[in-house]
Amino acid sequence: MIHKTVLLHESIDGLDIKNGDIFVDGTLGGGGHCEEVAKRFGDSVVMIGIDLDPEAIERASARLSPLEPNIRYTEGSFRNIDTILDSMGLEKVDKILLDIGLSSNQFEDSGRGFSFQKDEPLIMSFKKNLKPEDLTAKEIVNTWDLENIGAILKGYGEEQFAWKIAKAIVARREIKPIETTTDLVEIIKIATPKWYHHKKIHPATKTFQALRITVNDEIESLKEGIVKGFERLNSKGRLAVISFHSIEDRAVKNFYKSKSDEKVGKIITKKPIIPTDIEIKENPRSRSAKLRIIEKI
């Protein structure tokens, strides 16, 4: 499946990339944004593609290679953008893009439990090679206490039936361990009212979102990444972030406001840029995307 890049032209236009720029795609994913930059600027823009998932880097590299871009790939997290740039001998860069969404490839083909439509082990980590100490969704649902499970479902999933689902998870694991996505979907369906099963979004969507955010420490990664990224921008450099739910968007909005108040940043997007009706129709997963851009003064 080819991942459809969200807000593609809006984000690249908004970054105002110029020949000679150093452009960092901190969430390389399918490589769609880098592909657009390469099409527009050839090898006159130096690109750095960062992703936690080595399979994403392989796919992006294969997609981009016919364009012969000037790009360096790095396996890692954008929250460590400072050490990544240090390792490349780069003090400053010109443009940074973070697309915080889950790519279609990760969603559909990972085998790691991101999709509630497939029967897969409950892993939900972006990391391909897990260490014993790395957190998984299976560990959360089988070992965390009721209060903590309920708190993440409410806080990160904004799930209205968070506590009912949390109680159902705890009750079920006392009978047998919760191993797969199918196990978890069954629990959620039992814990929620029938009418909730017929809404636009699947009843498991918010629970899966909350678990994925927790496993990958996504909110703290975002906060850390934008602070470090902004610090490494040249004057007139721009940082663009595409977020997909209110917690992420709030973090970005608040950070941009703080930099504007400090007179070190100029907010380019007074209101977030959202997908057109046409894009949402072609790619329903884009419906909640919001793009915010700031320029360093």
Image (cartoon, grey):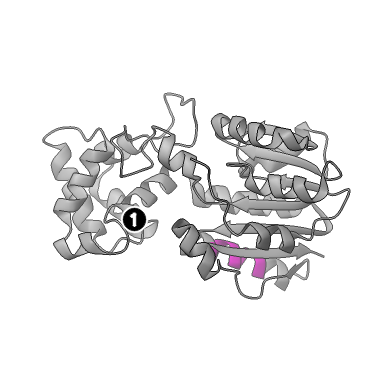
- Taking 222 as reference, is 9 left or right? right
Task: Give, as a single range, the part of the protein colored magenta.
Answer: 249-257
Is residue 93 visible to us here? Answer: no
Left or right: 83, with 219 as reference point: right
Q: Identify residue for label 1.
A: 206
Residue 24 in view, yes or no? yes
Task: Please state the horizontal and vertical placement of residue 212, each as a whole percent of the image.
Answer: 41, 45
Nearer to me, 157 or 104: 104
- Residue 251 lies in the magenta stretch: yes
For image coordinates 69% across by 39% down, the residue present is 49
Q: Where does residue 283 sit, x and y in percent of width and height?
A: 48, 57
The quadrant holding residue 153 is: bottom left
The x, y position of residue 127, in whole percent, is: 50, 32
Quadrant occupied by the C terminus: bottom right
55 to the left or right of 84: left
User: Residue 155 lies in magenta, yes or no?
Assistant: no
What kind of residue is marked 1? Lys
The residue depicted at 17 percent of the width and 65 percent of the height is 195
> What kind of element bears circle 1?
helix
Q: Position of residue 1 (x, y in %)?
A: 48, 40
Identify which residue, 224 or 252, lies in the foreground.
252
Query: What is the quadrant of residue 79 in the picture?
Result: top right
Residue 4 or residue 128, whichever sits in front? 4
Q: How many marks?
A: 1
Point 76% across, 53% down: residue: 95
What crowding class fits label 1: few (fewer than 14 Cα within 10 Å), some (14-19), or many (20 or more)? many
